[in-house]
Image (cartoon, rainbow, N blue to C red):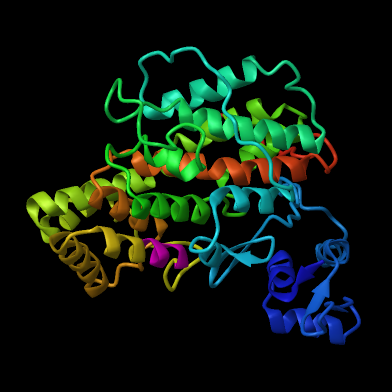
Amino acid sequence: MLESEEAARRLGVKVPTLYAYVSRGLLDSHPSVDGRRSLFDAEDLERLARRSRGGRRVESRLATVTTAVTQLRDDGPAYRGRPATDLATTTRYEEVADLLWGAPPGSWEASALPDPPSLGTSERLRWAALMAGSIDPLRADLRPEAVIAAARRLLATVVEALPLPVPGDPGPPGADGGPVAARLTARLVPAVTPELISTVNSALILLADHELATSTVAVRVAASTRADLYDATLAGLATLAGPLHGGASQLAYSLLADAQRHGPEQALNDTLRFQGTLPGFGHTVYTQGDPRARVLFGCFARLADDDQRVLLAEVMGLAADHRIPAANVDLGLAAVTWATGMAADAGRTIFTVARLAGWTAHYLEELQERPLRFRARAIYATAG
């Protein structure tokens, strides 16, 4: 059942038009359990949509994806009805993953992998996912409990496959076998503090899922072919590797680093000259500002020094003066990683690890759908 805003979006109309359909008897509404909201059946909506198109199906639509994982709202994403911005300050990442998966608590032990080759961080994450799948003897077991157990192992494995900041250093307590946020933080900074672990945990939760993002669609397409979790994850990792998706925070990090070296005015002007837009600003969903970014800016304020806080304020103020859209989560993530001395690609790493939880949730959900349902239709055009 869909809420009124989502039902209207599915039909491509405004909410008042949706209720006009109800009053004219074209569509049925159903009260929610608490009696405060109206709900609409997805199949009824599809029938009405086909009727408005003269009974024809829209060939260009890839598939209708109904999900109970994440809803995008004005206050940010809600995981199974719970706001991510609330969870980010009250809950551990592992608990949020279990919430997304509908699973009880379980073990998060990493698989033992051979020493990795000399690779960049993104390549090492993909290598770890590939190797983890290669040593799972029953990777084709698609029962939910087996997928969830594999997801826990996979997530722990890719984190512990990342290099420690000081080669040969065993890392602080919790670097292996502790909470996921602690394990990951130990691989991002040489000096781990409780405040840093808490911040990384918040970032992991805020980025765990964002409905049908491009990489999530790739995972669901793989799941529709009944690929195993490891191969579906590799599909997501390949899509996330694009600079317009997983790499956005790294571009925002470069903007802040340039502002520190050359001043905000030159940094913003040069970025606009060579990139055309400012990374870390604007969002197609959160047009009035990204609620996830506000949480991360709060973390930044506690971790940054006075000069860093002033510089970020100047960058955001200059953007606002020129009516550039409000900051998004990529700038919040970049600000945290920049202020704490993490590498420029640390935001991409956090984003990737975080999204493994959401991908698994969508993978599990897609397994309940009809296989091979994603089939786009091409419009053939002869070469000129």
The residue positioned 72% from the left and 64% from the top of the image is 10
Q: Is residue 292 magenta?
A: yes
Residue 29 spot, x, y in % from top left: 86, 78
Vertical side of 269 occupied by 343: above or below: above
| Number of numbered markers | 0
The residue positioned 82% from the left and 33% from the top of the image is 143
The residue positioned 57% from the left and 40% from the top of the image is 356
Residue 116 spot, x, y in % from top left: 43, 15
Left or right: 166 as drawn, with respect to 77: left
Residue 33 spot, x, y in % from top left: 84, 77
Stretch of the chain drawn in magenta:
291-296
Vertical side of 325 occupied by 225: above or below: above
Left or right: 330 as drawn, with respect to 64: left
Quadrant of the drawing holding the N terminus: bottom right
Vertical side of 138 occupied by 175: above or below: below
Left or right: 314 as drawn, with respect to 213: left
As drawn, the residue found furthest toward the bottom would be 23
